[in-house]
Image: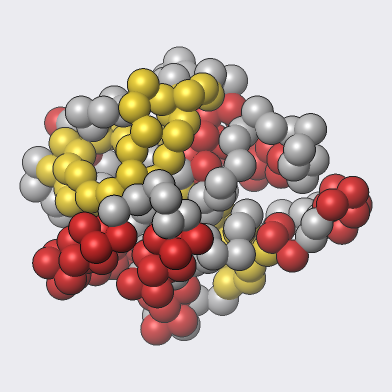
Amino acid sequence: MILIIQHAEIEGPGTLEIFFRQRQFDFKVIDLSKTSGPQRLTKVVFPNDLSKLEALVVLGGSMNVYQEAEFPFLRPEIEFLKRVVAQNIPVLGICLGAQLLARVFQAGVFKAPVREIGWSKVYLCPEACQDPLLKGFGDRLDVFQWHDDTFELPPGAKLLARGNGCRNQAVRFSESAWGLQFHPEVSLKMLKDWCYSFPGEVDKEKILFGYFDRQEKYLHQAKTIYANFTGVISNKRSQVEV
């Protein structure tokens, strides 16, 4: 079973959920946006038994890693991530998810030098061509960004993609843990929801027209990342069965 952690109502699995359903992967979503106020911490239950967990995907959210007082589910979530990483279960962190992984690996998370919102390019490092998650691409990716924070590279981590605004865009934290600062999972509906939820912060027309301009290529790119990640899951499964 694949577990997906969602932090905000409008930041769901998007195209990743479509991919999992089409390929008939068994997955479950823990939606932290369904809890609220002082009950948030007590209502969040992360699995104790990890024996059935094949992979974990941690999505984005508007909160910051260091806002544990305002979002008390962050502390138990980080502890859960530590347990998953310690068992070498495949993990994919997206945006906030990547920053949470950085915290797990004791790297700093802080305000980025620039706030990145919209379409941009990230440039793949030489290590990416042989990496299980990012293999099959050329020297760059056309990505969608929406984040305020960034993170340091912890010791032993490999930088797989860098950006002009924020350097650390794709990172392999360990043998089976990856973080993407950008959003491969965004669908057109998600982009509309994000733009309408924050009308004063974005150029809605530029973002939506940008999606239509690159839709086919962008979706193919996302599917390649998902296929690579599920390939990691399948390899792990084979090792266990042997």
Q: Is residue 210 above or below residue 74?
A: below
Q: Is residue 215 visible?
A: yes
Q: Nearer the viewer, residue 89 or 62?
A: 62
Q: Is residue 75 visible?
A: no
Q: Residue furthest top?
A: 155
Tell me where residue 84 sits by quadrant: top right
Q: How is the image coloured?
A: secondary structure
Q: Position of residue 239 (x, y in %)?
A: 48, 55
Q: Position of residue 24 (x, y in %)?
A: 46, 82
Query: In percent of the image, x 34 and y 57: which residue is there?
Result: 184
> Which of the pair 159/70 is nearer the observer?
70
| Residue 188 placement: quadrant | bottom left
Question: Residue, x 48% and y 39% (percent of image)?
Answer: 98
Q: Residue at x 74, y 42 (%)?
A: 71
Query: Residue 166: horizontal and vertical position, in percent?
Result: 31, 28
Q: Position of residue 155 (x, y in %)?
A: 45, 16
* Direction front: furthest residue: 200
Q: Residue at x 80, y 57 (%)?
A: 36
Above-or-below relation of 240 to 173: below
